[in-house]
Amino acid sequence: MTNIGKILLIMILITFLVGCTATLEEDSTYKILEKNNIELYYLNQDRTDLVVETIDVESGMDTSSMITMVLERLSVHPEESIYHRSIPEALNVIETRFEEDTATITFDSYYTELSSLQEVLLRGSIVKTLTQFEEVEYVEFYINDQPLLDREERPIGLMSASDFVGDINNQESIINDIQVVLYFSNEDGSALEKEELRLLIDTNESLERKIIERLIEGPITEGLEPTIPEETVLKDIYIKEGICYVDFNEAFRSRHWGGSTGEVMTIYSIVNTLVELPNIDRVQFLIDGVKQDEFRGHLAFDTLFERNLDLVNMDE
């Protein structure tokens, strides 16, 4: 081969290699992660907020592989941690796709069984984790072959980090619109009835506090009656090992209208409302920080209360 022929062959090879490199760079599916670590957004100990754990990752992983790895990590409890997975054990990821700047995650139908709090924290966890990658600007959810819908049956569509306002690690907030169930007394005080409504709450607020404060305000549905004296002040509320401790001021007892049925309606309107939350199993009442033997003379007050659906009118 002549020298000119060799030179031409080398130029052709260089052109081919440059073309391959350009194609690789243009195909964002194969872009390489440059960071050596990533922040994973898990659920906190009470499963009411998101918390961050930083993990080391292999350098040189492509974006599609990173998405798969992240979803696998969020599906299991972090090692040696009090935090919890954000993807429930019963929820299956059917498929993941990455095209251009969008990661599409498809879940099975169990997604529709999630509570409002579980669902919004799941979305926040995945979106805030995946959009750390330079190549991922948007995340989209599907349930089987249908796009995720909002409460008005409209597709939620592409989600970005800006949809979840704030940096959780710096104690700023994500504003959530959460559906809750409250229990109030019926008109004659003989049974409890549900009232479903939506609360705007950020993830730095206590959901259980917000719910009890809303319960104190009373119902908005005609025909329902309040169960808590309006002078009541919620002094403290916290959850430990599935037990919600509710600390009211003395007015909760002293301003109550009394009667055995009235006491039962008040206590179980609170208990049934709180146990609607997935992280609460039982309720312990306190008055000014102290357990009391009785409420108003008819009901033992120092016990752990569990949900009682026998008091709920199911003929709505």
Image (spheres, grey):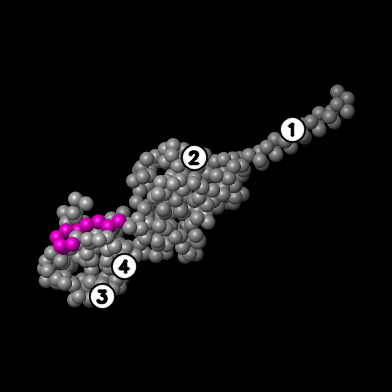
Q: Which structural element holds mark 2?
A: strand
Mark 2 sits on what residue?
96
Mark 4–mark 1 distance (CA, rounded to whole Å): 68 Å
Q: Is residue 282 visible?
A: no
Residue farthest toward the top in the current orientation of the protein: 1
Which of marks 2 and 1 precedes in the sequence?
A: 1
Residue at image position (31%, 54%) is: 278
Q: Is residue 193 magenta?
A: yes
Kindly report the distance in space between the C-alpha atoms of the residues bearing marks 1 and 3: 80 Å
| For discs 4 and 2, the disc positioned in front in the rendered view | 4
Q: Residue at x 61, y 44 (%)?
A: 32
Between the residue at mark 1 and the residue at mark 2, the CA separation in whole angstroms equals 32 Å
Determine the residue positioned at 42% across, 41% down: 143
**Position of residue 242 measured from the top left corner of the image (x, y, whole percent):** 28, 58
Q: Which circle's residue, 3 or 4, is located before the other in the chain?
A: 4
- Mark 4 and mark 2: span between their CA atoms? 41 Å
Q: Which mark is residue 231?
A: 3
Amino acid on which disc 4 is placed: Glu
Residue 187 in sight here: yes
The residue to which callout 1 is attached is: 16
In this picture, residue 91 sits left or right of residue 157: left
| Closest to the observer, 134 or 156 | 156
Residue type of the residue flagged with mark 1: Phe
Q: CA distance from mark 3 to mark 4?
A: 12 Å
Residue marked by disc 4: 213
